Amino acid sequence: MRSWAHGKGITDAMIDRETEKFRDYWRSASGQNAAKVDWPAAWRLWMQRAQERGGSPDNLRSLSDARQPRPARNARDIGLSNDELEDIASGRMQL
């Protein structure tokens, strides 16, 4: 997921900041709208909208990015366990 964002010109700093916002928003949400079938797609849409609010990819690349976290590989990288992601996708759990 992180490599997808890098391909869109989004910095690690913005990925970390927006992923935290995404996780907090959906964990606090309730109701039918909070249930998502495809959480990675919801995250990508969140990142695209954040990028649109923040300017062009060139502007995003120029932000200070002091640390280089490991690339995202699974649901845990956006703050969820794989079991939680499966439970959310199946409707057994809501964020």
Image: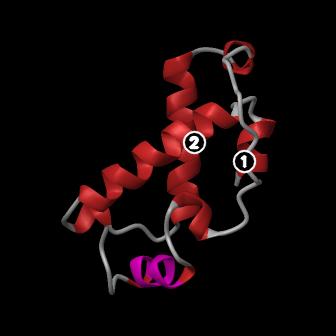
Q: Which mark is residue 43?
A: none
Instruction: Say which element carries label 2.
Output: helix
**Residue type of the residue flagged with mark 1:** Pro
Point out residue 11 in the picture as x, y percentages from the top left corner: 70, 31
The residue positioned 50% from the left and 54% from the top of the image is 42
Instruction: Say which element carries label 1.
Output: loop
Relative to 52, residue 16 above or below = below
Q: Which residues are magenta?
A: 83-89
Relative to 69, residue 82 above or below = below
Mark 2 highlights which residue? Answer: 16
Relative depth, front residue between 86 and 15: 15
Relative to 18, residue 27 above or below = below
Relative to 87, residue 67 above or below = above
- Disc 2 crowd rating (10 Å Cα; few below 14, some 14-19, many 20+) is some
- Disc 1 crowd rating (10 Å Cα; few below 14, some 14-19, many 20+) is few
Point out residue 47 in the picture as x, y percentages from the top left corner: 56, 39
Residue most toward the left?
Answer: 31
Task: Check residue 35 for magenta coloring.
Answer: no
For the residues carrying marks 1 and 2, which lies nearer the camera in this image? Answer: 1
In terms of image quadrants, where is residue 10?
top right
The residue positioned 50% from the left and 85% from the top of the image is 83
| Earlier residue among tags 1 and 2 | 2
Point out residue 9 in the picture as x, y percentages from the top left corner: 75, 29
Point out residue 76 in the picture as x, y percentages from the top left corner: 58, 68
The N terminus, quarter of image = bottom right
Mark 1 highlights which residue? Answer: 69
Residue 44 left/right relative to 62: left
Q: Main secondary structure of the magenta part?
A: helix
Asked if disc 1 and disc 2 are in contact, CB closer than 8 Å, the reply is yes
**Residue type of the residue flagged with mark 2:** Asp
What distance separates the C-alpha of mark 1 from that of mark 2?
9 Å
